[in-house]
Every structure is written in C-alpha cells, then in structure tokens.
Image (cartoon, coloured by chain):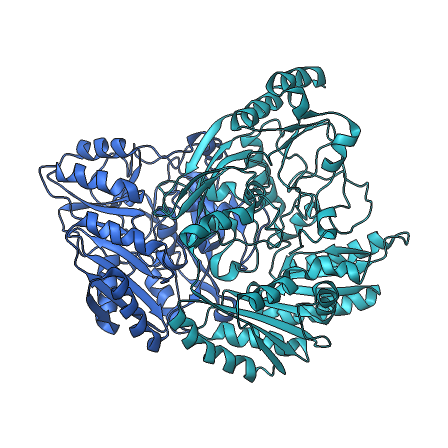
Amino acid sequence: METITSIEQLQDALREHPRVHVTGGGTKPALSDGANLSVAKLSDILEYDPSEFTFTALAGTPLAEIQKRLAEHGQYLPFDPPLVDSGATLGGTVAAGLSGSGRYRYGGLRDFILGVRLVTGTGQLVVGGSKVVKNAAGFDIPKLLVGSLGRLGIIAELTFKVFPEPESYASLLVELPDVEAAVDVMTRLATEPFQLHCLDIETSGRLCLRIGGIREALDPRLARLEQFIEQEGQTLRDDEDRRYWHDANHFRWVAEDHALVKLPIGVDQIAKLEKRLGELSTGVPRRYCVAGHIAWLAWPASLPTDHLDALLLGLGRPALALTGNWPSPILGAPNGQAFAEPLLGVFDPDSKFQLQQ
Amino acid sequence: MASNDILQTLGEIYPEDRVLTRSAELAPYESDGLTAFRAKPFRVVLAESAEEVIETVRACHRFHVPLVARGSGTSLCGGSMPVEGGVMIALNRLNRMLRLDPRQRIAIVEPGMINLSVSQAAAAHGLYYAPDPSSGPVCTIGGNVAFNSGGAHCLKYGMTANHVLGIKAVLPDGQVVEMGGDSLEMVGPDLSGFFCGSEGLFGIALEITLRLLPQPEKFKTVLAAYDTLEKAGDAVSRIVASELLPGALEIMDCLAIEASELAVGAGYPLGAAAALIVELEGPNEEVDAEWPRLEKLIHESGAYELRVAKDEAERALIWKGRKAAFSAAGRLSSDYIVQDGVVPRTRLGEALTRIQKMAKEADLRVANVFHAGDGNLHPLIMYDGRQPGAFDHAENLAGKILRMCVEMGGSITGEHGVGVEKLAYLPDMYAPSDIEFMQQIRAAVDPHEIANRGKMLAASDASSLSMHGPHPLEKQGVIFRE
C-alpha cells in the first residue's frame, strides 16, 4: 500500500501505476479491499470561513475532524454523513455517495458539494465547480463524483456548503404493528409541513422521527406530531436523542456477520421488498431511511448472495454493498451507462480505475 | 451542407404545419432573453412527442446539423439562441405532467412544462417545487435543467440540480438514456446531477423527475429599510452568524427600489439606501420562536423602518416588488444589461463599493439587486442604446464586474449560465487545462458538436450586437429578470 501525502505525489502515482484503487479511512471495506493507494494522510482542513458557510478540505480528512471544527461555530454537515466516528473520510464519503438519516431535512451529499480538485487516470489535476455557495459556470464535475467509487478519478480536495446546526433536537419513536403500518403513517407525514429532520422505520415497524430547531418550540411540535399520528410515542431529548441517531448512523444495529447494503428504493416498493424478505430462510434486519427512499439491509453471511441478486432484479434497482464479500460492491446494474461510458473514456482512458469485477 | 437530407427527414417526422420555414415564422425564435444577440435558424420544428424529439436528434446527428432546443426562450445568457443554419426544436408542446406522486414526493414532467405549473399541480397535495426563478410563470423545466436555474431561495434549498432526481434524455448521438430515478439516493455516479447545468451540450431531457417539498406552514416576510448599504450588509452578516437559516435573504439598493416602486408600487421605502428582505418559513411554533430573534438582529443592525407582511397578500406584494425590480429598470433607462456574478458573501460590501466606483468612472448608472444570502449579485447596468458605442461601453463595465467577481474568489454566473453571453469569461474562472478537459467531455458525448453549439464552451462569433432591452414578455409584465 502506497501512502500519498501530497497532490503532486498522487499525480505521479497515477502516471506510474497501471491500476489504481484508493482507500481512505477503510470504513467501507467492500469498496476499499484490495486498494493499493491510501489517501488517509492527504488530510487537512485548508479553508473554513463560518460566515461563508463553506469549507475546503483534503479528501483524506476525517469527517470527525471536520464536524468538530464546524461545531465550534455552531455549524454542521446537513447531509448527516454516516460512519463519522468509525473514521470515515470526506473523500470516501463522496466517492461512496453516502448521506445519513438527517439528509431528509435539507438534502443529501449531492446538494452540499460545491467544488473539487481531482486527479484523473492520466494524472491530470482537474478543477471542477467553485468555492462559493452558488455557481452555474461549467460542467458540474463535483456532482458527477458523488457515488463514482473512484472510477472517474481520485478526489484530492473538496469544497462543501454547510449550515448552522439547529440549537436542539428531539425525537419521537412510535411503535407500530409492522413496517406496512409504519409506511402508511410515514407517507401521510411526508406531505405535512412538520419539517422533519429524520423519518426512518426500523425492522420491527417502529417509526422514528426527529425534529430540530429552537428549544422552546420543540415540545409543542412534538405534541402536534403525536396528535397527527394518533398515537403516543417515546420522546428522546438531548443526550438520549443524540445517542439514538449516532447509533443509527453508525449502523450499530448491524451484527458482525452481516453485510451492509444500501438500496435506494421507492416508497411503493417497500411492501414488495418486505414480502420477498419474509420469504427468505433467514431474517434480514433492515432500516428504511429518509421517508422510505433508502432501504439499508443487513445481509446475513449465511444467506446466499444470489437471493439478493434475484431480489434486486425483481425490484429493478441496483444496490451498493459497503461491507462483506462481493464480486463487486455494485449489485445489479445502475442505469445511465450510455452516458457514463463516454465520460469514463475521458476521465480514465487507460482503465486504471476498474474495480475488481 | 446536408440541407436537402435534413429537410427531407424533418418532413418525414413532422407534418407540414409543424415545420416553420418562412422568415416571419422564424423571427420570434431568433433571440431569447438576451436580446442583444440574434441568429436565424434554418428551420424551427414544433415537437409534440418524445419520439419526434429523438428522431430529430438522430437526424441532426446523422447529417451533422447543429441543433438547439428551446422552451420559452427566457434565457438571460443567450442559452437558447439558435445556431445560424441549424435546426431549432421547440419543446413547449411537450408540457405534460406524467406522474405526480405525493407519497414519494416527486413529479415526473416533460421538458416544456412551465416551472410554476409544477407547484400549482403539487399544491393539491400540500407540496411545491422549490426552485423559483423570477421567470417562473413562463420558463420551462427543460430550460431550468439545462441552465441549473436558481431563484430567491437557493441558500436554503439549492438550485434546480438539487431538485432533479432523475432524467430521461436523448444524447446528442441519438441514444436514449435514463439516469437517476424516483429515489432521493442513487447508486453510481450522479449522472442526472451532472446533466443539469450542461447548457444543452449533453442533449435534450425528455422526462424529468423532480423532488417536491411540503409547503411551509407559516411564512414571516419582512422588509427592512437602511440608510446605508453597509448596514444592510451588516444585518446579513449577523443573521448568517446566528442559528437562524432564513428561506430568503435579499437586498436591493436605492436605484433598484426606485425602479421597482415606479413599476409596481409595492410600498418599498423610497429614499432608503438599501432594502433588506428576509423570509422565515417553517412550522408555526418554530417561526414564532425564531421571529423575536430575527427582529432583534435587524434592529441591532440599524434598520430605520421595518415592515412585516401581515398576510399572504402582503407577502406576495413584497415579493412582487423584488421580482419586478429588473424589468422595472426599464422605467429608469431604455436599455440595460443584467449581470449575474457571485462573490464570497463576506466580500459583498467591498464588491458593491467597487461596482459603484467603476460605474462612476464609466459614467454609467448601476442598480443592484442581490441574493445576499449566497453572495449572488445582479448589477443592472443602464445605458442609452441610441448613443453610438453606448452598448459596448456598458458591456465593458459588465465584463469588469465579472472579472472582479472571479478575482474575489467567486463566479461569473450564479444562476443564469454562461451561454453565449459569458463565453469570453469562462477562461477567467477555469485554467486552460480545465476548459480543455470540459471540451474533451463534450467531444466524447457529442462528437459532431451538434448540441447547442457555441454555448458555454466554443468560441463565439456572435458579434452582430443590437440592443439590450426588455424581453417582449417582460414589457408585458409577464416575466421578470432575476
């Protein structure tokens, strides 16, 4: 494993190596296993001006370090990146295209990325986007890199937009009979103006809501939510609230011998997914996040992976494995190949970034 | 020139009455919101189905004929200006909503659907479509996608790309591709995000999946008057440094206020050096709790007058004054150039001072309206188009302002796009190697460079400048400039 400490060194490495597979914090082993280049030392917050709502950091900078700096000024990453305290880096989170439950309020990673410096397969350093919160000039290369899994280039530096963090949060956990019942309440909530920060469903059918804002407004807001749901729930505040969402965003509900899989989905496909999962010989723990737009699955090691392939085929959706052993972390076929192919030819003409297939 | 071949093919795709050929029919398509530039299309076709669009692109690809797609033609950067001798494809008739799904909070629309119509249709479910360019009542979603349009609420809710989840498009080589989908999340590179803002260079969007948001329960919209621009700027700094995140933060200077009052009489504070518009939005309890904090910040910043919208009608009036500001400039000057630069927010005051100084040196009047929350300036440079050389003189100042924005670490465009208008300034923002890289991308996707040739990247030969001035729809008060 070669450790990169500067952008120049990264460019040299790209020119020298016939194949480049990069890793950062190594928190998503299904993506980084077999890597031959580490950018974990390409780490620093280069610019941060709280009054601009922006910061620029090197790709290997741990999210924990960024969060800490932002918190000193009452700001945060609204896309709520997962695995922060496991050591996830900014660049790895972009490449994997990951946002957490809290993305429900203001948007995902794609909505906060502003600028990038990346090194392409030829070793060329390319600048895309800008360092201001609003820019419409040139192709939006930063967005293209979200979820690109290191196939288009190695991200060296990133600029992001940030927001002031709500001064307080509170959550409501409502026990419902099953996922189906919870989905019903969830979709009714989705069109209401409650401005929820999180809207998740656990395997049991427990509905998990989070609101944020001015402290004195939280209680009346919670009361109205309970009234709307027509059921009382367990209220979480302060440390308890923080701990709950921290655990959720670190996938503490996923056991060691299970592989973590992200499955973007449509709300109306959840019933079908539930049915298919129910037919399997082993239970698949899961969590529906962001009002049912993502299903996180904990795939048991004992369950053959072709069951998952069949399931994805039935749903017509691709998925992304973050842990576990898979021939490729991309399960199923993402769409848009006719557009992606010519782009690959420009970013990676010598196919240096091909993942193991 | 394959003019006979393309003519024959167009004749096979379209009935005669949907291929415009006569000079009088083509004239309305010669120009868009950037009226200084004109070109004559070879033919304009009025598409009514996605299949017709696909067939047209394939024909243009086959015969290497330049192709420009057009919605309502409101682009302020010449983005939908035709290419001389090329085909223009009008998409207004592809204006259906294909799916409205409140459970998933999405709408799937055709490219010719009007921006405001999406929110109108979604309102039945308590939802709305957030991007609100001032041309919203007429501009189309297809155009919004191509130019990544903004509006007054970008700081909090982002631009068009942030609200596009999926796109079905025909690429310049005629291949039809689906990107993204109906989920907020995806697997693989964010292709639909990359397609947004590509100014038509990646082809034509045929179906667009939009993210909808619940309509806020309560708004608190305030208009504050200041005797100096610095104080208004200070108010913005204080708000940004607080825990509040308003839905909109806008400033207008005295000349912009004067123009707006002459045009729509929304009750803006005449004589004030600056007017600040701040809008809180959210659940009742949250807005009620935020308001005293905001009021305190505004008072501390030295506002001498504060008007709070008491109801939806008063809120609408405040926004009418703001959104009409630029077309209203026609009341002060027959001709004007609208600019769209971005500076780091903390340097807004410095930028305005420099703009005033440059305007004085050039002996030109400049009104300023800006999205203060995101540092997006819209200087409006007034000139008299009847004077020889006046346009060039004004354009020269516009160029200086854009270069200042880049020099300060900002951008040459926040939301209008590069188009024809800012082609010359893109190299100020990106290194030659970065522009060359974009050219390579473009060439890989569109080897014959048929799709919106001459916009964003290629060199401009559009030198036949006539006069700037209001768009015909702007004169009627139907659309407004951002």
Q: Position of residue B111 (x, y in %)?
A: 54, 38
Asked whether residue B34 appears in the rendered view, the answer is: no
Give the residue displayed 28% in from the left and 65% down from the top: A225
The quadrant where residue B342 appears: bottom right
| Quarter occupied by the N terminus of chain B | top right
Picture layout, residue A350 above or below residue A112: above
**B461 is higher (above) or lower (below) than B115:** above
Residue A67 coordinates in the image, percent (x, y): 36, 66
The cyan-coloured chain is labelled B
Q: Residue furthest left?
A: A281
Task: Specify the quadrant that holds the C terminus of chain B.
Answer: bottom right
Of residue B300 and residue B460, the one placed in the foreground of this image is: B300
Give percent across and percent down for residue B405. 65, 60
Q: Do we see residue A146 in this rendering?
A: yes
In the rendered view, does B302 fall on the left or right side of A26?
Answer: right
* Up-down relation of residue B298 to residue A292 (above or below): below
Asked whether, in this view, residue B331 is left or right of residue B281, the answer is: right
User: Which color was chain A given?
Assistant: blue
Q: Is residue A327 left or right of residue B33?
A: left
In depth, the one of B347 and B193 nearer the eye is: B193
Which residue corresponds to the image point at 39% horizontal and 39% vertical from the top-left? Answer: B181
